[in-house]
Amino acid sequence: MSSTINLRDESEILMQTVPSKDKPIRILVVDDHPITRFGIVALLQGQQHMEVCAEAGTIQSALQAFMKHRPDITLMDLQLPDGLGIEAIRRIRSIDTTARIIVITTYQGDEDIHQALQAGAKGYLVKGMSHEVLLKAVARVSTGDTFFPSSVTSLLDKRTVEQLSERERDVLRLIIAGKSNREIGEKLLIKEATVKGHVTEILACLGVTDRTQAVVTALRRGLEHL
């Protein structure tokens, strides 16, 4: 992993750091599941130094809420009705390059994590982690630091360097959709022999031997989502 990214192991953060300021940390919660969002909001509102200033369930509403409230921290789900949270992160960071965003998601693939970091996320949490970890992440990131639990950094450390080209990603997406080489060729307006060549490269890049394994691996790593 690049040494330019400051990643901290969860074990190094044993104490919950509260910023030394009188005003609470203002938080925007973005999640399209009302029950999940309610739980997160209730947890944060119960903290003396934290305050939920807004909620959102889509990319568009998240952008509107961010521009209106300018929160100190944005908690961002990656699966939203109108697109991936990665796009929301990019758009928020285009509005304010200092925006501090923590991903909180069910996606656990190394590619998901990598894309979130590239977009500008300052933390990455997987739903199912303890609420103490969430509170630590909010407190840490609010001070200008980053927060990535050891389980997340471990996935990044194992991330393979081989990358699929845009055309290979197109082919992979259609493989996942169950298309044959002939159907992929017709869809992408390329020869079937060319498709076969792309499939060979995809299998090699993912370290698998057949199309089924390629689909499973791509979904597990977060290269594509159903």
Image (spheres, helix red, strand yellow):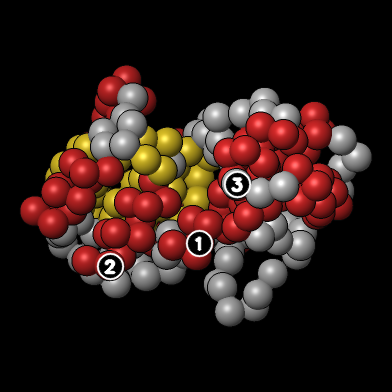
Residue 87, image x and y in percent? 37, 52
- Please, what secondary structure does the residue beneath circle 3 have? loop
Q: Residues within 10 Å of mark 2 (few under 14, many from 20)?
A: few
Residue 157, image x and y in percent? 73, 60
Q: Is residue 130 above or below residue 28?
A: above
- Mark 1 near mark 2, Cβ–Cβ under 8 Å? no
- Mark 1 near mark 3, Cβ–Cβ under 8 Å? no
Q: CA distance from mark 1 to mark 3?
A: 34 Å
The residue singled out by tag 3 in the image is 189
- Does residue 204 appear in the picture of this structure? yes
- Please, what secondary structure does the residue beneath circle 1 have? helix
> Residue at 60% across / 46% down in the picture?
189
> Residue at 72% across / 30% down in the picture?
180
Amino acid type of the residue tagged 1 in the rendering? Leu
Q: Nearer the viewer, residue 168 or 112?
A: 168
The N terminus sits in image quarter: bottom right
The residue singled out by tag 1 in the image is 117
